[in-house]
Image: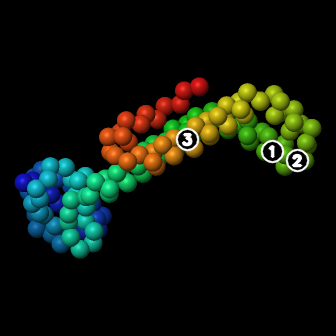
Amino acid sequence: MAKFVLYKNEGKIYRLEAELPPSDAYIVFDFDAENPEDLIYDGSQIRLKTQDEKLQELKAQKLSELKTYVASLLVQTDYIITKIAETLIQNNTAKVEALKQKYSAQLQQREVIRAWNEKMKQIIQSAQTIDELRGIAIEFKE
């Protein structure tokens, strides 16, 4: 049995490591759990998260990690897209085609990264267990 604190304004639960003075801003409670991440406050009661809730939460974290990682890969060539877009706005189609030719390898690499991103999203979303999800490495390999 461990002591936890629920901060009402945040709706977040933390493990209580020291005594707190009385306040209406939080609720101190005991629960048969070790990790505050396993608990949830649903607006009326504090309870253990179900396996499905934990799985969905971990999927959201993995998808966020994937999004950040893919953005870090694409940002390296964003200047090319900006260059092409600016040229396109100027209606200079000949120069747009020249830029596409000049940067064809980088543009193709961006397409490969995006395709990999979509594949990884599907893998993450179709994971059935927490262990399966934890085993998914987010690492792009050419």
Q: Specify the quadrant that holds the N terminus.
A: bottom left
Q: Are marks 2 and 1 in contact (CB under 8 Å)?
A: yes
Q: CA distance from mark 1 to mark 3?
A: 31 Å
Q: Is residue 4 among what the camera can see? A: yes
Q: Residue at x 73, y 40 (%)?
A: 81
Picture layout, residue 97 above or below residue 18: above
> Please, what is the three-letter code of the amino acid marked with disc 2?
Gln
Q: Specify the quadrant that holds the C terminus.
A: top right
Disc nearer the start of the sequence (1/3): 1
> Please, what is the three-letter code of the amino acid marked with disc 3?
Lys
Circle 1 Cα neighbour tier, 10 Å, few/some/many (<14 / 14–19 / ≥20): few
How far from the left and from the top, in percent, is residue 109?
67, 31
Disc nearer the start of the sequence (3/2): 2
- Residue carrying label 3: 119
Query: Would residue 110 be found to the left or right of residue 99 on screen?
Result: left
Picture quadrant of residue 77: top right
Circle on res. 90: 2
> Please, what is the three-letter code of the amino acid marked with disc 1?
Glu
Nearer mark to the viewer, of 1 and 3:
3
Circle 3 Cα neighbour tier, 10 Å, few/some/many (<14 / 14–19 / ≥20): few
Q: Is residue 7 among what the camera can see? A: no
Picture quadrant of residue 99: top right
Q: CA distance from mark 3 to mark 2?
A: 35 Å
Q: Residue at x 37, y 54 (%)?
A: 56
- Residue carrying label 1: 86
